[in-house]
Amino acid sequence: MSDEYKRELRHIVTVSGDTELLSAPAYYYAARKAPSVNAMISAMAIVQDELSHAHIAYCVLEDLGVSREWLMYEREPHEFRYPYAFDVPLDSWVELCVANAFYDQAGFCLLSDVHDNTSYGPWKRGLVKVGKEENFHLLHGRRWMKRIANSGDEGRQLVCDAVKWMFPMTVEWFGLPDDLKTHSSQLDYKMKGLTNDQLRQYWMDSIVPFCDELGLEVPVHRNADDTAWELEYELPVFFDENEKRWDLEHHITWDQVVTRWKGRGPRNEEMVEEIQRSAGDFSWMFKDL
């Protein structure tokens, strides 16, 4: 294994592990707003799954010479590498369900691509379990989205409001467009098989028909040749994290987006600090109950 291969492998697995780890508190906070005990049990099962997925990734990293203790407990909050989406609070049960449908579908797309194409066997084997459980998560979100959207005008509006900000958030999840990528080492080393734009299309292949089925409007359509999805706004656009609102008419640069990503979002420090404090102290889990 060359030094460059190991460096790129560590990077992609770290992003995967950190994403799984930080999704757990993000989902946990919202799960406490479940409408019933049974609903909360299902949501907490997802939280448990996400923690086990992080454990799998961190075990792979430990085999590559990275300390699990350092990964979880010795990094500063801004050093964790995961999608900006999880730094934006999920303030309701509805938003949690849309996150399960949208974010976990994104995770499924990314990791199924890695599973199908990775040249590193230990991670491929670990992703078998991850893929099956991510499929459960996204189906959980879809079932609840459908249930709430069909419950009446109020429920449908709540789902529409969540989709309005969470659809563009997940579109952005897949990163820079291919024409702005400056290196392709992960593709060259066969750590994954699809580019950012291909993964974005893969995600929309699943999500857009589902939204259409529920009668939910999303700003995308098929192109003239019916060969790909075409956004009805020009990436990237401005996001107001305080209002959780995208201004699709306010075009910004990718440099500005990267600055936002690196600066992290409203919940970064809180979530990381609570995870790190959990080494022997679980009192944070019962806060506000």
Image (spheres, helix red, strand yellow):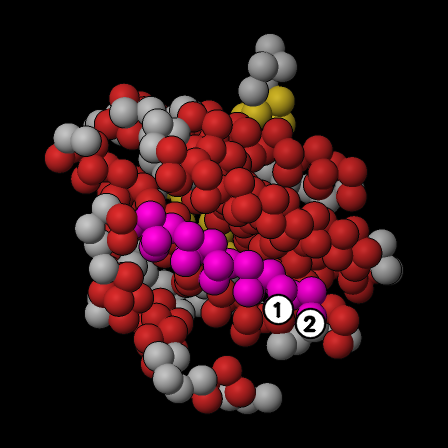
Q: Position of residue 246 (x, y in %)?
A: 49, 51
The residue located at (62%, 22%) in the rendering is 222
Give whichever of 45, 248 is nearer the camera: 45
Callout 2: SS: helix
Tag 2 residue: 40
Tag 1 residue: 44
Discs 2, 1 touching: Cβ within 8 Å: yes
Q: Position of residue 31 (x, y in %)?
A: 62, 71
Q: Position of residue 60 (x, y in %)?
A: 33, 48
Instruction: Specify start and end residues of the magenta stretch as a single range.
Output: 40-61
Give whichever of 107, 1 is nearer the camera: 1
The residue located at (72%, 44%) in the rendering is 216
Going by the image, does 140 lie left or right of 121? right
Q: Position of residue 49 (x, y in %)?
A: 55, 59
Q: Is residue 60 magenta?
A: yes
Q: Is residue 263 visible?
A: no
